Image (cartoon, grey):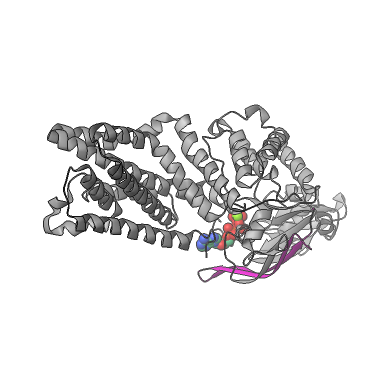
Amino acid sequence: MQAILVRGLRRSFGDKEVLRGIDLEIDYGKIAALLGPNGAGKTTLIRILTTELMPHGGEAYVAGYDVVRQAGEVRRRIAVIPQDARPITYMTPYEFVYSYLLLRGLPRIDARRAVKDSLEELGLWDVRKTPIYQLSGGMMRRVLVAAVLASNAEVIFLDEPTVGLDAVSRRVVWNSLRRYSSSGATIFLTTHYIDEAELISDVVFLIDNGLIVARGSPRELVESLPGKYVVEYPATINSDSCIRVGDSCLAFVESLNEIREGALRVSPKSLEHYVLITIKSWGENYEEG
Amino acid sequence: MRRVKGGLGHQLRAILVLAWLNGLLPIIRSPLWTISTLTMPISLLVLLTILYKNVGLVMGIVGGLIWSMLSSGTALIGDAAYYRLELKFQQMIVATPTNPLAYTVGLALSEVVFTLPGIVLFAVLFTVITPVDQWEALRVTLSLVLLWYSVSALAFYSSTLFTYIRYIWAVASLLTLVLGILPPVYYPAIYLGRMWWLAYLVPTSSSALIIQDAVGVVHYSPLQVNLAYLSEVTWCLLGTVLVMRVARWRSS
Ligand SMILES: Nc1ncnc2c1ncn2[C@@H]1O[C@H](COP(=O)(O)OP(=O)(O)OP(=O)(O)O)[C@@H](O)[C@H]1O
Ligand SMILES: [Mg+2]
């Protein structure tokens, strides 16, 4: 049984088709990242999988249960940090995480232990009694992560969990995610930091305009690119051997000797380059979700 | 994985947790905040007492009790919408065993807790100034509970109609005017003359009518009082139907 199984999922807002037949499956114990441009439908997909929004077609199962017909069963087994979520600011981190766990149905003793472990893990133990409004933005975000990772959910959904986190905090969160998934739980997250997806996820899904356009482990996807390095030229350059993306043109080369005049930057090929050339609709969806 | 429950016991606990986190905690953290909700009913009480002496005092106390219930409703509109639109807290709770009804009741209860200083103040004044027998005290309590229920249900329902948080503040003050000041909450319904039935159109004045009658500050006919109960019960039923329609978590 997969932790998440989605077949032909559709959803429209008005006459705009936002999800146009999503297929995906994710095993237990995996970290999966959903990448895609603004407005591609990531948040919409997560809202449906967390039983908060009704799909218009197709099927979706989370933890083995139908998100439409068995929503109650699904809700017991999942946890979510929605995009732009914030903790209640007059509470302290301890109070917030603790009450969230009680609302999840954990016995009080278990909840207290889980709060302590989670706040320590996310580096919030020292500020556990400070009102959240006195914390920095990144710390507030970590309070939310601490709450869901203290839960006993089998499948966790995180919609852009690391926005605004500094380099060290991101690593703290990454380590916690890995620790959580290694106990057999699945984590499904979205992010615009492609390096993050490359570093932490077992499997990556690229969503473009409501369709999954690529999937695989970060390594497989990067390996599928030709050459070793990527040279970026201005889009105005006259060449057929480079691929136009926005204002740049990307050329994949085997060796650094192949760099020509006018190159803007050179880097080893990465998941970011894969995403850049695979997504077709950059800049077409400028509405924010 | 560990097993989790979602039975009745859990829902009751969830209600208490919500009442604590949204009712008790804010009072403890910033008492000034709750006192600010008292300024209006106290002003009216003082004004009425100066103008109309004893009768004014009683009317002001009855109005204050109604006002406390009403303000717990308007606070609920704001909080429920804030948690859904701004903090996305409701969406986090969707993905837990806590069900939508427990969430609604928990928030509604939290607003009562938050309004408790006002309720206590006016209840104490009430028992000191207007001695009533047990039977009358029961009627007063019953009508206030019905009022709380209907106002909370309507408030939660209306909070779901908003898609943008800033409209809430305007609507809350408009509701205070339409439900607290215009209908006969602070004055006898008989002042409406042949239009006395207007008092039944909103739950606040129906409740006020019952309490005014119970303390004997205004005398209504038994028919008028019974109609007030009928109006209150109808509002409760309507509120329940509306909450059932929206308390499903999922937006379509
Ligand atoms: N409630 C809504 N009503 C109307 N349109 C909506 C609604 N929610 C989302 N949309 C539209 O659906 C599309 C996809 O939105 P969604 O939030 O899923 O994108 P996203 O991939 O999460 O984008 P981002 O990276 O910016 O968060 C957008 O065009 C958005 O305008
Ligand atoms: Mg989004």
Q: Residue furthest left?
A: B193
x then y, percent, for residue A78: 67, 53
Q: Residue at x 49, y 47 (%)?
A: B106
Q: Is residue A47 visible?
A: yes
Answer with left or right where residue B210 lies relative to residue B52: right
Q: Nearer the viewer, residue A166 or B204?
A: B204
Q: Nearer the viewer, residue A120 or A222?
A: A120
Q: Main secondary structure of the magenta part?
A: strand
- Counting every numbered tag in the picture gives 0
Q: Is residue A14 magenta?
A: yes
Provide the residue span drawn in magenta.
A1-29
Q: Residue at x 47, y 61 (%)?
A: B244
Query: Toward which corner of the image does residue A77 lie, by quadrant?
Result: bottom right
Q: Residue at x 56, y 52 (%)?
A: B91
Answer with left or right where residue A223 lies relative to residue A4: right
Q: Nearer the viewer, residue B27 or A188?
A: B27
Q: Residue at x 42, y 62 (%)?
A: B241
Q: Is residue A238 visible?
A: no
x then y, percent, for residue B156: 43, 53
Q: Is residue A268 magenta?
A: no
x then y, percent, for residue A278: 73, 62
